[in-house]
Amino acid sequence: MKKGKNKDLLSMITMIGPIGFWMILFVAIPLVYVFAISFMRKGIYGGVEFAFTVSNYLETLNPLYLQIFIGSLIMAAISTIVCLLIGYPFAYLISMKSQIKKNLLLMLVILPFLTNSLIRMYGWITLLRTEGIINKVLIYLHIINQPIQLIYNNFAVMLGLVYCLLPFMILPLYSSIEKLDMSLLEAASDLGAKSRKTFLKVTLPLTMPGIFAGSILVFIPALGLFFIADLLGGSKSMLIGNIIRNQFLTARNWPFGAALSMVLIFITLILVAVYKKAGGSMDDLV
Amino acid sequence: MINKTIKKIISITIIGVISLTAMTGCGSGKSKEKGELNVFNWTEYIPESVVKQFESEYGIKVNYSTYSSNEECLAKLQSSAQGTYDLVVPSDYMVSIMKKKGLLEKLDKDKITNFHNVNDVYLNRDFDKGNEYSVPFDTGAALIAVNTNVVKEDIKSYKDLLNPKYKNSMVVLDDQRILIGIALKALGYSLNETDDAKLAQAKAYLEKLKPNIKLYDSDSPKSSLISGEASIGLTWNAEAALAMNQNKNIKVVYPQEGMYIFIDNFAIPKGAKNKEAAELFINFILRPEINKKIVEAFPYKSVNKAAEDSLPDSYKNNPASNIPDKEMIKGESVKDVGAATAKFDKIWSEIKQ
Amino acid sequence: MKKTAKRKINNIFKNAYIGFVYLFLFLPIIVIVVFSFNTSRMNITFQGFTTKWYISMFSNTTLMEALINTLFIAVVSTFVSGVIGTLAAVGMNKFNFRGKRIIEALLYVPVVIPEIVLGIALLSVFSILNMELGLFTIILSHITFSVPFVIITVRARISGLDRSIEEAAMDLGANKFKTFIKITLPMIAPGVLSGIMLAFTLSLDDVVISFFTAGPGSNTLPLKIFSMIKTGVTPEVNVLSTLIILVTIMGLACVTFAQARKIKSIKN
């Protein structure tokens, strides 16, 4: 009974206090603001009129918007899976290297991202264009005869999304894989388990937290990175991010934009809750 | 594991960071100084040298921020405290919206003595009769740019763009009012038509045009024209001018049905703290020699009739920059259509699906 | 002999895989560096070789100012989110308290809410609080969207960590603060490092939220670059990016050599 209750309370306040304060002031309050607007009516010249209505939410049920929601969700899901497939082996292999190499390799992952993302997207446009570098190289190597369209289509958008979000998968994965106790893996193989079984039954479950964190940090932003669809996709598709942006800008329909945002937040929270349940005992994992 | 030197470095950094943060948070009494001007303008509209010249001539410090669309300007203006900005540059329809929302101050024309330098064609328009709240800064249009090396036909109108030969070859502006407006004009209606039946026809027109569109781009359509990715463009006239400089094969066409034109104007937000400085700035920009500097840097069409003679030949002879006034008069501007805006937005979302 | 040969081939494949991923990540960077020598002012086609932009960039005062602002904002917001986020991750892992679920749910909001909505909402909050817009407000907004990334990353690390070491330390007489600094922090260090690296890149790249929360005249690098699109982003920006990468590589090289030398000296 050395530690009194007060000391526990003090350390809890020190740790949770700042985040609690921050969340309330800069997240809860803006959220309430958006929530409130979603029930108002659009003002004649934009802005909001203080009149309660649920018409904005009813409008979100329009099949046009539902279609767009689903399209965005699918695109985000595919990018997440691709990032996972590419990122997991990568994070695993890096974590096996020596201490010095590990840190260096990790920093090298971030290095490209110190450059502005717009400039990097322009770099991709130069690479993917019809008369761009990749086509030129492929033709030079006689792999193709005519240039293929690598840009302003879904392929380019997917590439852009994966490119921008890969570190968000690699870093959490690495952080979780790195603490794997190698002795556990050795014990498993000593006990006769083949490497695939060890992976499925030991490695994978132990690195689930990393997989979970990485997927979340890729999937959710992927829903909103519409500027990639605009730049690399030629702005030919409407994603939920475009629609919401249009409501706040061109259509000057803030209430509808707010309603769409609330629906987006709601869907995301549900998906995260489902994901957590599917992962089993990850309750302590945000 | 954490040795002493690293501990020292960390503590010094922490102290440094905290004090710097405190300083930025507290030291924000800047705009209480005399002689400041907060300008909120479009990107790439006024060259830095012009701003610096104003600063040194009048001893007023200019804080210059930029936006890339009227609605961004409106959104920021509406949500920030009154008096944050002293000068904004909204387009025609946005001036009328801001006026109606009570966001603008009346201009003191006595202070803006160079007002008479403005070309009459662009004054006294519907969006601000008598120019009580706004003074034109520049004007421009959305026109057709053609790479004559690739496109051998003579394109004269919006209807010509539907030719299936042009499949997957066009870059068009990513703007719902302009694209739907052009479809309406191609059908002989007004850019601002809100009748449902006519809008449905416009939507059908755009569906026909869609296969020809390779990409939408309002930010830098010139890039696709210059790189050859697109051989026809529906772009801003300034973008076309820049593309023409890089590729001599690119020619511009003023579509027969009439272009979408815009006029960007200076306006002073309500509650501006430095109204007089703002009016000084407007007057400064309206000087012929200053207009010349601006036009030399950014190839938009000038509204300054006093500057006309002194403008460089590169501007005068460029059909993209120097669109003849008679073509501009034929053109039509976007007007705010109030509640019908939602109709345009819906059509746009459907087309992009 | 067979086993070592197999292992060697295995190693080659492994390193090749790592190499390919890095190639993917660095491909556009190579383009950026090459184009920093482009004679054409517009970043569209490569027209000729020149080093003039390397000289003119340093006299581009607005670009330099924007760079300094951006670095300052990134360092401060990363530091603060790192501290708040790490404390929160450890605390939430340790304690259960009323409102924990609410805070957990709220954490996702800055991640999922569209940037334009968060930007406008934060701007309104600043207006209500009568805060003057400036670098300070930008920093506050960057911390807001960075903290969730730090927390989620650190928690992935903490989950399943052996807490018995901490308990042992405290039983041996160390107070909570000392335990945190000497035991907990080193154990979660890779997680914290990953988290703050993510926060740093988020801050460096932010456009939309910075647009709404910036004051008149506080310009950031991403905002400045976005504003150059109309007349073409000049190669000076490429020069800047190339130099930033160069400086970082040199810094990494120094740190790596220092570490290697330290380990060598320990071995000897």
Image: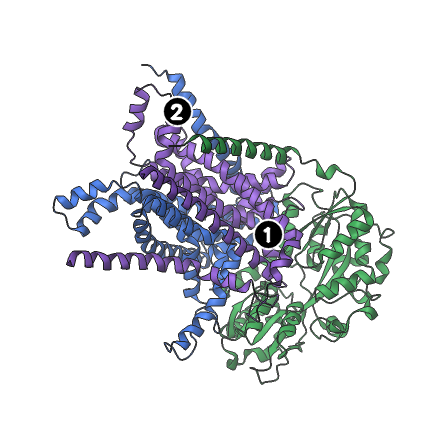
Chain colours: A blue, B green, C purple
Q: Which numbered marker is on residue A229? A: none
Q: Residue at x 25, y 40 (%)?
A: A181
Residue type at numbered disc 2: Lys
| Same-subunit check for callouts 1 and 2 | yes
Q: Quadrant of the C terminus of chain A?
A: top left
Tell me the element at label 1: helix
Residue type at numbered disc 1: Leu
User: Could one spot residue A224 in this view of the protein?
Assistant: no
Q: Is A279 on the left or on the right of C127, as rendered?
A: left
Q: Position of residue B161 (x, y in %)?
A: 57, 78
Q: Position of residue A231 (x, y in %)?
A: 51, 62
- Earlier residue among tags 1 and 2: 2
Chain designation of label 1: C
* Vertical order, B1 against C26 (above or below): above
Q: Which residue is mark 1?
A: C223
Q: Position of residue C202 (x, y in %)?
A: 49, 47
Please tell me which residue lies in front, A244 or A144: A144
Tell me the element at label 2: helix
Q: Position of residue C154 (x, y in %)?
A: 38, 38
Please tell me which residue lies in front, C104 or B191: C104
Q: Which numbered marker is on residue C178? A: 2
Q: Quadrant of the N terminus of chain A?
A: top left
Q: How far apart are the alpha carbons under marks 1 and 2?
A: 43 Å
Neighbor class of circle 1 (other Cα within 10 Å; few <14, some 14-19, many 20+) is many
Please tell me which residue lies in front, A5 or A101: A101
Quadrant in the rendering for residue C159? top left
How many numbered discs? 2
Q: Is B69 on the left or on the right of A189, as rendered?
A: right
